[in-house]
């Protein structure tokens, strides 16, 4: 009996010890955020970006398994799960074998987890971290998989895929261990250990069209909740609509979405500096629009550019890192390495 007690004590202190050393991991993905999108936002914002605070810079090769030009599903899967796959697939490799995501590895280690996006929460980038489907368009299936998944906090649009479904199920009613909130105020005051905040029925509008709440406010509140759990955490924050500005070939759209993402990066880096033991990685899944910056005026905060495509391009994208084990992310590597480097940070002393 005494032995059992000592053993339990030993075990819990080992678990406590390993959690103390496990870093928080914050992965920030600017969808479609190539170097030119960053430069545009930087020049339009008084020639500065929060990214200048980062200690290490790398470059990520974004090609999908079956195409030089990736989509957000294949590149999301590469970063989330560490495997190259075909465009459209989420959480599966080219043989449709499911792979565990970094969020799922973190969860196994006792981490609290969070996903935030300015698209729907079922869109390809956030879904890469929990869904296993052959097509990113299977939104109702993806919503069902999220309902079964146990991501602790999630924020994004796409409410209708939970409640207005072909199978007539109401996933929000079924997810009884979650608190669902409707407003930023409710999100702030809710102390539930699992919270879903479905911000819009479908895809959220752009910032220019008045999207609220801001990604930076949502991120700061989520960080407070994560910190309060007193456990290490994994959080993925996506600036989803930088990509949509690129698809629209609309530089004002790109710049406004980048600026909000940049403010969010600043908040995250402030948190990481204050907290310590936190790894922050900021990158993109691919570039969108083949954007070239052709003119502008720093003093007036104006930029002009031209786009080469309505789709994505295959250029490498930058990876910025800060904090615990940030040095792992310098160099030039495949996007799958982002998963492997985060995984290494998770298990490293
Ligand atoms: Mg996305
Ligand atoms: Zn896109």
Image (cartoon, grey):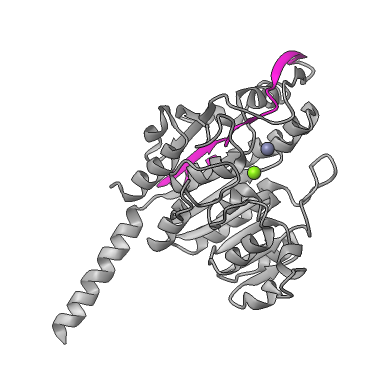
The image shows a total of numbered marks equal to 0
Up/down of 193 relative to 125, above or below: below
Which residue occupies the extreme left position in the image? 3
On screen, residue 35 above or below 203:
above
Magenta stretch: give its range: 269-298
Name the residue located 67 percent from the left edge and 43 percent from the top edge. 240
Q: Quadrant of residue 143?
A: bottom right
Residue occupying the far front of the picture: 95
Residue nearer the viewer, 179 or 130: 130
Indicate the quadrant of ligand 1 in the picture.
top right
Residue 2 visible in this rendered orientation of the protein: yes
Q: Residue at x 71, y 16 (%)?
A: 293
Q: Is residue 288 magenta?
A: yes
Q: Position of residue 339 (x, y in %)?
A: 43, 43
Using the rendered image of the protein, determine whether residue 270 is visible from the camera's viewpoint.
no
The residue positioned 63% from the left and 63% from the top of the image is 141
Q: In the displayed structure, would residue 220 be above or below residue 180? A: above
Q: Residue furthest bottom?
A: 1
Rendered location of residue 324, percent (x, y): 39, 41
Q: Nearer the viewer, residue 267 or 137?
A: 137
Q: Is residue 247 left or right of residue 147?
A: right
Q: Position of residue 50 (x, y in %)?
A: 59, 32
Residue 281 in the magenta stretch? The answer is: yes
Q: Where, quadrant-wise, is the N terminus in this rendering? A: bottom left
Residue 216 screen position, x and y as percent: 66, 46
């Amino acid at each position: 009996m005494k032995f059992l007690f000592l053993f339990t004590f030993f075990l819990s202190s080992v678990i406590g010890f390993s959690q103390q050393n496990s870093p928080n991991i914050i992965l920030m993905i600017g969808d479609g955020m190539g170097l030119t999108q960053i430069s545009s936002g930087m020049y339009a914002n008084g020639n500065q970006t929060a990214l200048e605070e980062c200690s290490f810079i790398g470059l990520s090769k974004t090609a999908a398994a079956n195409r030089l030009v990736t989509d957000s599903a294949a590149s999301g899967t590469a970063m989330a799960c560490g495997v190259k796959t075909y465009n459209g697939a989420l959480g599966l490799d080219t043989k449709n074998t499911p792979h565990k995501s970094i969020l799922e590895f973190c969860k196994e280690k006792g981490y609290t987890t969070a996903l935030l996006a300015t698209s729907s929460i079922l869109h390809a980038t956030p879904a890469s971290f929990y869904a296993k489907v052959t097509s990113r368009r299977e939104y109702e299936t993806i919503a069902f998989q999220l309902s079964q998944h146990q991501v602790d906090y999630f924020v994004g649009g796409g409410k209708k895929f939970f409640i207005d479904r072909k199978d007539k199920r109401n996933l929000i009613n079924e997810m009884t261990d979650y608190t669902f909130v409707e407003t930023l105020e409710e999100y702030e005051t809710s102390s539930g250990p699992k919270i879903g905040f479905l911000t819009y029925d479908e895809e959220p509008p752009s910032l220019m069209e008045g999207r609220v709440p801001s990604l930076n406010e949502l991120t700061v509140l989520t960080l407070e909740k994560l910190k309060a759990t007193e456990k290490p955490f994994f959080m993925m924050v996506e600036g989803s609509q930088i990509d949509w500005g690129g698809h629209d070939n609309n530089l004002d759209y790109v710049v406004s979405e980048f600026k909000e993402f940049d403010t969010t990066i600043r908040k995250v880096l402030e948190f990481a500096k204050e907290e310590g033991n936190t790894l922050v990685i900021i990158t993109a899944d691919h570039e969108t629009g083949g954007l070239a910056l052709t003119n502008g005026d720093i003093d007036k905060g104006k930029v002009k550019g031209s786009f080469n495509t309505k789709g994505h391009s295959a250029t490498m994208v930058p990876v910025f890192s800060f904090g615990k084990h940030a040095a792992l992310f310098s160099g030039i590597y495949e996007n799958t390495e982002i998963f492997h480097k985060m995984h290494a940070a998770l298990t490293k002393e």
